[in-house]
Image (cartoon, rainbow, N blue to C red):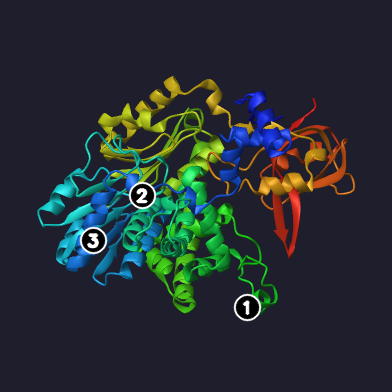
């Protein structure tokens, strides 16, 4: 019996689907997938399937970009000391690496700074400003943070330090008093795309500076240009491309929508990684058992684009690159992550990547230990197990992994969850994670009188409170959740794009489906449902790994049997083995193993014909 709700999407008009299918010459299944992603015309489909740097918006449309570039120009001209400041996660460290690496080619008097997770916390810190003062900094460019740094901006002013904020988080009612505040989410910012990552904001700063330096803009593409202008435009594109690998890593890891500009930036960033990866990224990937093709193989196969044995995708960045870059900031220092991303040769990169991989292994151990302890406590205490929410405190849990532990508990118990530990200043600090249909930030607002600090968004937040308020907070939070959570929200949901038959899975269908990538939020890999299937008796099902169901699936409408893997679906082994009929919802994916690639079903759930 299924433990998940299956929701078949129907948020489209069939007339729009039919019209798009006719104009593109594709079947209705492909047209349905496009319409569900907001693509309804031939021109929109052209942009969707053929991302181009020409589709990027003019960076000077962003509020305060002209002021930011003018201030940077002034700093470069006067040879003032600049500090590139960023958050300690993947988005922040990749943003710092991008902006620092570009301006370091123009301006030697430059430094970077990442706050310590434990002693300084998130955002622009007073300690960071003290460092800037002590080292003679006159301009701070803050990336992936700063939009709420009201007091810090005033503090910096006392020492004659200007700040340019480049953030993508929601601003408060008051903006910091800085020389420039770049954030598309500002109410008064006309920039057309609001969902850039923090590194994406850093990229737009670099793009704007390059454009005014070279004298041509990407948005001039298609206009009548002189030969010299066209030459400069192509040079601009080539110069910008070298930084898009970092933007792609940030987009993947920060889980921002894979739409609009993000999709363009991620597409080209993946091409850079697959054809000319920077040493730091190549070194990280070796620990994911992804090897670069040999020099001889690249010479013998010049038509092969990928530098690696298989084309890397967004998932590779999410699961292999992001966690390792994050691990340095969680366990040691995020300065190491920036140094790795800035490394110019494999010798330096390999040494740093080894250290960071060791941090990641340590992080995994701490994560596993805390998660197992949390599950034991939940399993042994009926009062905890019967609640609508989970709030746990662990004295010895590492601050760098509590967010991961909270996410693991949500995956297992599917309830709004907060995991806390003790900070160096004797507060309880931690992370909140929510389920799809519950606004955890709004719930925290109802408990704000018991909190020292909280901030975040609907799905995730950071929290701190005094120990004496803990028990009161646990009860208040449970009361808020129990009163406001929708009944259906406590059952995990699988949103299915459309129903198909195995006979629909043709080479052309698969070829077009691949072009929907890169996948991410708001452009997820399609989930299909196919009904009335049975297990292939020639390849009996088996349980592999950690309760994963490996089997082969047959349909009456097709001679093809598809291999399938259902992660954590081992509980269905007996019923699948008995040749019962069933429906499956799944994603189609390429399984790469020992030099061979095959199409398999990544099964999300199974329902039997009871």
Marks 1/2 in contact by CB < 8 Å: the verdict is no
Badge 2 marks a residue whose secondary structure is helix
Label 2 crowd bin: few (<14), some (14–19), many (20+), radius 10 Å: many
Choose the circle earlier in sequence order: 1 or 3: 3
Choose the circle earlier in sequence order: 3 or 2: 2
Q: Which residue is drawn at the image coordinates 62% and 43% (left, top)?
A: 525
Q: Which residue is drawn at the image coordinates 52% and 70% (left, top)?
A: 283
Identify which residue, 211 or 462, lies in the foreground.
Answer: 211
Which disc is residue 2 wearing?
none
> Which residue, given by chain and number where applicable, does mark 3 sit on?
73
State the image coordinates of residue 173 (x, y, percent, origin top left): 24, 33
Q: Which residue is drawn at the image coordinates 58% and 39% (left, top)?
A: 43
> Which residue, given by chain and number where applicable, does mark 1 sit on?
295
Q: Nearer the viewer, mark 1 or mark 3?
A: 3
Which image quadrant: the C terminus?
Answer: top right
Measured in 3D between alpha carbons, the distance from the residue under mark 1 to the one under mark 2, in whole angstroms, is 38 Å
Q: Is residue 137 above or below residue 48?
A: below
Measured in 3D between alpha carbons, the distance from the residue under mark 3 to the one under mark 2, in whole angstroms, is 16 Å
State the image coordinates of residue 432 (x, y, percent, origin top left): 41, 39
State the image coordinates of residue 483 (x, y, percent, origin top left): 43, 20
Identify which residue, 38 or 585, lies in the foreground.
Answer: 38
> Can see residue 397?
no
Apparent side of residue 52 relative to residue 507 in the rendered image (left or right): left
Q: Is residue 592 above or below residue 391?
A: below
Marks 1/3 in contact by CB < 8 Å: the verdict is no
State the image coordinates of residue 20 (x, y, percent, origin top left): 66, 33
Badge 1 marks a residue whose secondary structure is helix
Choose the circle earlier in sequence order: 1 or 2: 2
Q: Which residue is drawn at the image coordinates 65% and 74% (left, top)?
A: 298
> Which residue, given by chain and number where applicable, does mark 2 sit on?
59
């Amino acid at each position: 019996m299924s433990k998940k709700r299956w929701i078949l999407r129907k948020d489209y008009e069939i007339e729009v689907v039919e019209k798009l299918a006719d104009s593109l010459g594709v079947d209705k299944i492909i047209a349905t997938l496009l319409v569900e992603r907001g693509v309804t015309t031939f021109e929109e489909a052209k942009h969707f399937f053929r991302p181009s740097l020409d589709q990027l918006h003019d960076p000077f449309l962003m509020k305060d970009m002209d002021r930011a570039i003018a201030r940077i120009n002034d700093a470069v001209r006067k040879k003032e000391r600049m500090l590139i400041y960023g958050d300690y996660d993947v988005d922040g460290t990749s943003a710092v690496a991008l902006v620092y690496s570009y301006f370091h080619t123009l301006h030697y008097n430059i430094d970077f700074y990442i706050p310590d997770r434990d002693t300084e916390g998130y955002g622009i810190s007073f300690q960071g400003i003290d460092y800037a003062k002590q080292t003679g900094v006159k301009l701070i460019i803050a990336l992936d943070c700063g939009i709420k740094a009201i007091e810090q901006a005033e503090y910096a002013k006392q020492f004659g330090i200007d700040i340019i904020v480049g953030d993508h988080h929601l601003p408060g009612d008051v903006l910091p008093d800085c020389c420039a505040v770049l954030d598309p989410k500002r109410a008064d910012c006309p920039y057309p795309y609001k969902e850039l990552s923090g590194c994406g904001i850093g990229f737009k700063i670099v793009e704007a500076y390059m454009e005014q330096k070279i004298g041509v803009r990407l948005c001039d593409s298609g206009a009548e240009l002189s030969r010299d202008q066209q030459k400069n435009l192509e040079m601009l594109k080539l110069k910008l491309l070298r930084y898009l690998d970092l933007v792609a890593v940030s987009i993947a890891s920060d889980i921002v929508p894979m739409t609009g500009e993000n999709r363009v930036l991620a597409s080209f960033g993946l091409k850079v990684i697959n054809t000319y990866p920077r040493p730091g990224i190549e070194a990280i990937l070796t620990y994911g058992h992804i090897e670069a093709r040999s020099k001889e193989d690249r010479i013998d196969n010049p038509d092969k684009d990928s530098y690696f044995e298989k084309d890397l995708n967004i998932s590779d960045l999410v699961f292999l690159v992001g966690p390792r870059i994050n691990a340095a900031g969680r366990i040691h220092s995020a300065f190491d992550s920036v140094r790795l991303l800035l490394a110019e040769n494999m010798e330096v990169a390999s040494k740093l990547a080894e250290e960071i991989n060791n941090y990641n292994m340590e992080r995994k151990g701490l994560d596993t230990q805390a998660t197992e302890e949390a599950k034991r406590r939940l399993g042994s205490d009926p009062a905890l197990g019967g609640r609508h929410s989970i709030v746990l405190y662990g004295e010895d849990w590492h601050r760098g992994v509590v967010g991961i532990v909270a996410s693991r508990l949500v995956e297992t118990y599917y309830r709004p969850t907060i995991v806390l530990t003790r900070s160096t200043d004797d507060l309880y600090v931690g992370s909140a994670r929510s389920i799809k249909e519950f606004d955890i930030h709004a719930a925290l607002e109802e408990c704000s009188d018991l909190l020292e600090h909280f901030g975040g968004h609907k799905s995730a937040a950071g929290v701190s409170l005094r120990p004496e308020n803990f028990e009161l907070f646990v009860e208040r939070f449970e009361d808020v959740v129990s009163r406001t959570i929708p009944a259906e929200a406590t059952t995990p949901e699988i949103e299915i794009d459309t129903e198909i038959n195995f006979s629909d899975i043709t080479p052309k269908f698969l070829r077009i489906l691949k072009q929907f990538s890169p996948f991410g939020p708001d452009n997820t890999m399609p989930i299909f449902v196919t009904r009335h299937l049975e297990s292939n008796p020639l390849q009996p099902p088996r349980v592999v790994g950690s309760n994963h169901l490996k089997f082969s699936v047959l349909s009456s409408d097709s001679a093809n049997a598809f291999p399938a893997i259902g992660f954590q679906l081992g509980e269905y082994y007996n019923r699948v083995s008995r040749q019962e009929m069933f429906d499956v919802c799944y994603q189609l994916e390429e399984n790469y193993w020992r030099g061979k690639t095959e199409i398999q079903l990544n099964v999300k759930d199974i329902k039997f014909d009871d």
